[in-house]
Image (spheres, helix red, strand yellow):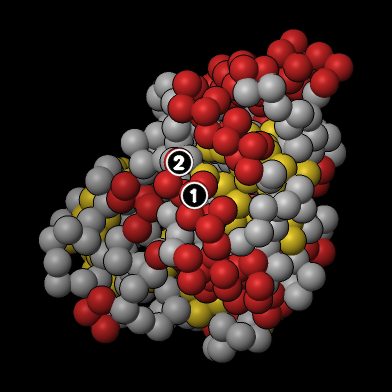
């Protein structure tokens, strides 16, 4: 089945009955994209953007655009090319602060990018020497305000501390750019107070640098709904963000931007894999693993929902903890924690992992020759 024109089915059961896929398959649901986008659009007054890195599949980008996502967080000129191939008028924010001058020139002249993140004085100098300073160009200072508990932390690689952010923002203003602020609390953040802490820091930076902020970008980090997650509901995050902005900025509230990746993409896709081997009721070997769609399950403390299929039906019965291996000849190709699966699981069953729309398609490789993966459009999938 071509991944360019996926077949459409009402359910996972229908895919298995009609196709009996023998290679790893992504099951993509437009319905779930609509629900995810609506949760943000209806929940908070902010420009909703999408972090393309989470999943650059063109059909997902199109579906998000159709559901009100008009701006996109891009990290490379390749992402810009993919995005504009399907959404020519997409607004792009170049939020990867590590860029060459050639990449900046391409972004500015070829793709019309007018929003750039920096977190170091050398990056600001590089931009100022490459593109003309103008109020039409937004320089967003990425700052950090301490580590966030229960999240995949980005602070070791990105973000400048408060004092440095004040100096950097003041310099960007002096050069003649419009100036905004942004932060990212870390992927799969289960602590809504992390946003409160960073918004308070943003207010201090703006006041000290005498800024009239163009926008405040509160980043992503909003957690997907994994069974292993202890995160509060999305509405709690919105309440915390709105309350923090009001208490710290008052009547001078800046326009807000959000750039979720995982939370917009995760529920859009489940992954359907097939059992190659079951050993001693203790372990199973699947036709994809950490060199493919399950890479993030290896590195992140997440446990996606799972169900097992046979003959078009969900396998029931007693459940045991199974060690899960991928198909490659590499012992690294295993999941870091056991998965609860039916004891009756056997060769040729299918295992469906839900909430896999984020970072699964973006991280696949062809290691050991396991390169073929199908895509199907499916109305109802595991979430």
In space, the residues marked 2 and 1 are separated at their CA atoms by 6 Å
Depth order, front residue of 5/213: 213
Q: Residue at x 69, y 57 (%)?
A: 114
Quick check: 196 left or right of 304? right
Secondary element under disc 2, as helix, strand or loop, is helix
Depth order, front residue of 216/147: 216
Q: Is residue 159 visible?
A: yes
Q: Is residue 14 visible?
A: no
Quick check: 133 left or right of 287? right
Q: Which mark is residue 90?
A: none
Query: Circle 1 sits on which residue?
Result: 125
Secondary element under disc 1, as helix, strand or loop, is helix
Q: Give the image location of residue 301, x and y in percent.
A: 36, 38
Q: Which residue lies furthest to the bottom in this view?
A: 2
Give the answer, above or below, for where 197 lies relative to 313.
above
Number of marks in picture: 2
Contact, CB < 8 Å: mark 2 with mark 1? yes
Image quadrant occupied by the N terminus: bottom right
Q: Where is residue 9, by image quadrant?
A: bottom right
Q: Give the image location of residue 146, x and y in percent.
A: 43, 21
Give the answer, above or below, for where 371 lies relative to 239.
below
Q: Residue at x 67, y 53 (%)?
A: 133
Q: Give the image location of residue 148, x and y in percent.
A: 44, 25
Q: Give the image location of residue 316, x and y in percent.
A: 46, 51
Query: Circle 2 sits on which residue?
Result: 121
């Amino acid at each position: 089945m071509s991944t360019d024109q996926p077949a459409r089915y009402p359910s996972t059961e229908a895919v298995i009955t009609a196709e009996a896929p023998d290679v790893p398959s992504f099951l993509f649901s437009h319905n779930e994209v609509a629900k995810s986008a609506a949760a943000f659009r209806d929940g908070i007054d902010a420009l909703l953007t999408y972090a393309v890195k989470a999943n650059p599949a063109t059909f997902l980008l199109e579906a998000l655009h159709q559901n009100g996502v008009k701006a996109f967080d891009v990290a490379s000129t390749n992402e810009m090319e993919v995005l504009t191939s399907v959404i020519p008028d997409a607004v792009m924010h170049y939020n990867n602060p590590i860029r060459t001058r050639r990449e900046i020139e391409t972004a500015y002249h070829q793709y019309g990018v007018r929003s750039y993140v920096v977190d170091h004085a050398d990056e600001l100098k590089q931009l100022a020497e490459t593109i003309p300073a103008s109020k039409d160009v937004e320089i967003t200072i990425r700052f950090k305000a301490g580590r966030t508990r229960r999240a995949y932390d980005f602070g070791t690689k990105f973000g400048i501390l408060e004092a440095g952010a004040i100096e950097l923002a003041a310099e960007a203003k002096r050069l003649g750019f419009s100036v905004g602020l942004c932060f990212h609390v870390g992927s799969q953040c289960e602590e809504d107070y992390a946003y409160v802490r960073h918004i308070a820091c943003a207010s201090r930076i703006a006041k000290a640098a005498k800024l009239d902020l163009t926008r405040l970008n509160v980043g992503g980090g909003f957690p997907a709904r994994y069974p292993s997650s202890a995160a509060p509901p999305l509405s709690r995050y919105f309440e915390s963000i709105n309350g923090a902005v009001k208490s710290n900025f008052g009547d001078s509230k800046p326009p807000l931007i959000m750039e979720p990746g995982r939370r917009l993409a995760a529920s859009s896709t489940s992954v359907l894999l097939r059992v190659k081997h079951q050993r001693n009721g203790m372990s199973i070997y699947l036709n994809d693993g950490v060199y493919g769609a399950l890479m993030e399950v290896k590195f992140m403390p997440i446990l996606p929902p799972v169900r097992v299929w046979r003959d078009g039906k969900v396998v029931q019965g007693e459940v045991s903890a199974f060690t899960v291996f991928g198909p490659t000849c590499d012992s690294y190709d295993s999941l870091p924690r056991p998965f609860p699966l039916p004891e009756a699981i056997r060769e040729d069953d299918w295992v469906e992992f839900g909430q896999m729309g984020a970072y699964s398609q973006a991280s696949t490789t062809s290691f050991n020759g396991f390169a073929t993966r199908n895509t199907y459009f499916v109305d109802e999938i595991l979430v």
